[in-house]
Image (spheres, rainbow, N blue to C red):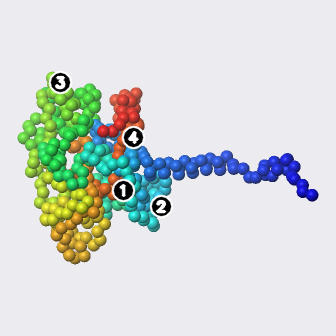
Amino acid sequence: MITFPKNNTIAESISTKKTKSAFREWLDSVFFAVIAATLIRWLFFEAFVIPSSSMEHTLLVGEYLFVSKLHYGTRTPITPLQVPLTHQTIWGTEIPSYLEWIKMPEMRLPGFSDVKRGDVVVFNIPSENPGVYQKYSNVLPNLKPHPIDLRTNYIKRCLGQAGDKLEIIAGQVYVNGTVSENPVGMQSDYFISSGTAINEVNIFRKNGITEYSPYTETFDDTLPGNDENGYIVKTAAQTAEKLKSYDFIKRVQLSVLPKGIKESYLFPNSDLLNWNKDNYGPIVVPKQGMTVELTASNSALYGEVIQFFEGNPDITNNNGVLSQAGKPITKYTFKQDYYFMMGDNRHNSADSRYWGFVPKDHIVGKAVFVWMSIDPDPLRFIDKIRWDRLFRVIN
């Protein structure tokens, strides 16, 4: 005779199963959220905040934006042992957030496009390579060496693609012999000559000028031949034209360094070149498969690339002579593409003019749109959020 358990017996057996506590359910939810956020951050989008004025007025200090990993292709992590949702250190500390016990080869998944001229790009700064980053500590303070995928993120505009010939003449960029289109919000230094003291808040701040300083001919020689006192301001060409309309302003002059005046800390640091930030080049941006003869000037320009970013073992650079395993290198073929990046605030940007080419394996993604804009120093509290800049597509 077969007997079946009564219904209430089945219910009792089910009820005896251990149920999750509220804390356990909360813990599972947090774990799932962290995993999901980590995957989204790695595969699709990453949040980025503008920390400096190097991209003004295209991007302002205090703006939060999303960076697309899909445009140029997502990179696989080199350093997988890392605390989720961190970059270099654990939040609020100087404790490294990663371990280098395991290192994986970097690969890049297929993307929508390659980096193009005019793109606003987030990338890992290449000067943090051991042996290179210390050289540029004067213009890039507080840098430390990290694995490629964990180096400091920078955001600039691509001015030169792989294979381009780039030159800056009197502050104007030329690519392949043609004038490069300037961004609408591009800033430069302007000298303002006035017959009286200027109310800086009413004139400069209300015209969107946040970087300005008095210019005294006695103590400042950045404008050769100038014998007037006034101000140096960083602003866009449109605003400079507007300033000319004020009756107490005598003249507004674009401030550029003359050709032939050598500027310290520029890339490459060579006595063979007398370049400055306004008169630079010409240079050819390295391209995968491009072969160059290594002359004295070429070795100065491409030596660090060949030594540090091409995966070449046993490369030495002795006074501009490159050698591998003790044998001099007379020509070299590049293994990957490189890019020349510059900030839209042309006279206040640590960019490729100072630390060189950006390798393709350092590219993080394309800046696509601003989702929040907070003014760190508003004239009025109600202007703390820049409402007119929210959800703005980045061009």
Q: Which residue is mark 1?
A: 151
* Label 2, label 4: how far apart the Cα atoms are: 27 Å
Whether residue 221 sits left or right of residue 88 in the image: it is left
**Mark on residue 64?**
4
Q: Earlier in the sequence, mark 1 or mark 3?
A: 1
Element carrying mark 2: loop
Point out residue 286 in the picture as x, y percentages from the top left corner.
22, 58
Neighbour tally class for label 4: few under 14, some 14-19, many 20 plus, Cα within 10 Å:
many
Q: Residue at x 9, y 43 (%)?
A: 224
- Of 109 and 358, the residue lying toward us: 109
* Label 1, label 3: how far apart the Cα atoms are: 46 Å
- Of 213 and 39, the residue lying toward us: 39
Element carrying mark 1: loop
**Mark on residue 246?**
3
Q: Is residue 347 above or below residue 209?
A: below
Q: Quadrant of the C terminus?
A: top left
- Of 252 and 100, the residue lying toward us: 100
Q: Amino acid at mark 3?
A: Tyr
Neighbour tally class for label 2: few under 14, some 14-19, many 20 plus, Cα within 10 Å:
some
For this orientation, the residue located farthest to the left is 225
- Of 106 and 325, the residue lying toward us: 106
Q: Amino acid at mark 4?
A: Tyr
Contact, mark 2 vs mark 3 (Cβ under 8 Å): no
Element carrying mark 4: strand
Q: Earlier in the sequence, mark 1 or mark 4?
A: 4
Q: Residue at x 36, y 29 (%)?
A: 388
Q: Which residue is mark 2?
A: 81
Q: Residue at x 26, y 29 (%)?
A: 207
Q: Quadrant of the N terminus?
A: bottom right
Q: Residue at x 9, y 48 (%)?
A: 259
